[in-house]
Image (spheres, coloured by chain):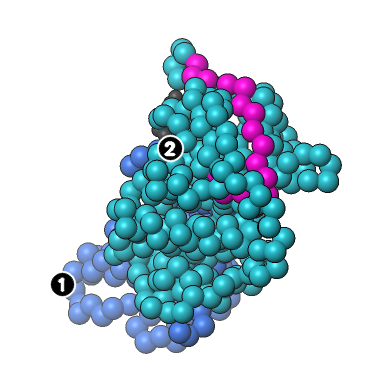
Chain colours: A blue, B cyan
Amino acid sequence: MERRTFNAASYSLSHLRRDGTRTATTIVTISITVAFLLLTSSLLFGMLTDGGGDRKAGLLAGDIPGSVDMFTEFRLDQEISGRARNSLMSYLLLTSAMVLMVGFFIMYNTMAISVMERRREIGILRALGLSTKEVMKLFLLEGAMVGFISWIFALFFGTPLILNLASYLINRGSESIFFVMPSMPLALVIGSLLVTMALSTISTYIATIRPVGSSPVAMMRTRI
Amino acid sequence: MDNGTSFISVRSVVKEYRVGDSTVRALDGMDMEIDEGDMVALMGPSGAGKTTLLNMIGGLDSPDRGSVIVKGMEISSLNEGQRALFRKNNVGFIFQFFNLIPSLTALENVLVPVMFDRDPPFDRAVELLERVGLSGRMDHVPGRLSGGERQRVAIARALINDPMIVLADEPTGNIDSVTAREIVSLFRELNDEGKTMIMATHDRLVSARARSVIKMRDGHVVRGKAKSRERIVHLADRKASGGIRRKVEG
Ligand SMILES: Nc1ncnc2c1ncn2[C@@H]1O[C@H](COP(=O)(O)OP(=O)(O)OP(=O)(O)O)[C@@H](O)[C@H]1O
Ligand SMILES: [Mg+2]
């Protein structure tokens, strides 16, 4: 038999795989959330920097044939009045905040349901000598994995999809549409990763900390 | 033991559960001493408090009153974090419903208690599964194993940290009598190697092969009888030849 290892990460991964449908739907919803955030924040950043500066420094920057710089694409006419600009910015900020909140609650909900269904399992783990902290780590790992995969999906599928759909609707009939890849600055790429990871782990933490800490005996008595 | 206490001593333990407005007294002034190396069958009608008592000894639950002392350590006064550590290092649990993790293979299930260790004892897990006769089933998930095979996985899991105490709550409750006999023989083997075994059971098959039988009713001991105390005395000899005795495959 070949040498293998088994650790907390393999545990979390095997659970995500077993709960495949839920994992997939959560990933889809969270990546839509993140894709939306990427678009709104590109627009916001574009307005703040007038689309100028080192925007080509991005991870997906423009050497890709047919790629679209999200800043220039979204850049507003510079002659727009200060007031219009400010109100547009507050709309964008508000939308971003709400999208973020929706993502947070979706993740919270998923983990809260998961933890309820797994009360017995948690009781078993605790009975076998894992501490509350260690069981929490398993859930946080799951949350972080879902967050990370969602972010990848958002970056490489979600945002391009929305962008292409939008440009199709706008340019319909006028010219032939090629698939375009958005480019954005590295700061936005990294920033969105941080926000996604924070969103998924914090919501997981809040959803699971109380049930995971309750009495192992009571949890093991749960029959599902 | 040296300081005059037994290996495990349960003293005037009271445990109550609140169910709605009423309280159920699961343990009612329970007193019990268990020697190291004993193999005890806890018997008594349903609701007598057997499971509750096992939970106290294993540090899964703490008494409302009284004390539980294991190896001179007052476990009833530990906090939950300390109790988790106590369970991990000293106690192997075996349950009636096996309590395996359904998404994991047999081998992974055995490794669950040690998955946060820096270097999980992978080889030991393999050895333990071989020992319980599951060399060909290591990569099977519990859903593809029979009841008896699941219980063997659970036994291997209980042994992964080489605990001094093995607690089994109706270990043969969901197993046919032929398999039950094999499981009890395995318990007996473990006991011969020096593990202190405490089994809550309704099964005569189990109690017949125990060294002592303790009868409980309404949360206290009705009758405790060591079948052959003198046999426990030879523990030192048994320990000398202990360790994992490997079973020939097949
Ligand atoms: N968590 C709990 N909440 C409420 N009541 C409980 C709880 N745990 C045990 N009890 C009650 O305490 C009493 C003793 O229960 P326990 O499970 O220890 O009995 P037992 O001897 O193991 O019975 P059985 O042979 O049926 O397993 C029972 O009346 C039971 O209903
Ligand atoms: Mg019971």
User: Tag 2's secondary structure?
Assistant: loop
Q: Which residue is mark 1?
A: A173
Instruction: Kindly identify the amino acid type of the residue bearing the numbered disc 2.
Output: Arg
Residue span colored magenta: B23-40
| Ligand 1: quadrant of the figure | top left
The single residue placed furthest to the top in the displayed view is: B21
Above or below A50: residue A63: below
- Counting residues from the N terminus, which is met first, the one under dot 1 or under dot 2? 1
**Which residue is painted at 36% across and 40% down in the image?**
A223
User: Tag 1's secondary structure?
Assistant: loop
Q: Whole-Å distance between the Cαs marked 1 and 2?
A: 64 Å
Residue A50 left/right relative to B98: right
Q: Which mark is residue B63?
A: none
**Which residue is painted at 64% across and 68% down in the image?**
B242
| Quadrant where the image shows the C terminus of chain B | bottom left
Instruction: Kindly identify the amino acid type of the residue bearing the numbered disc 1.
Output: Gly
Above or below A37: residue A1: below
Q: Which residue is mark 2?
A: A221
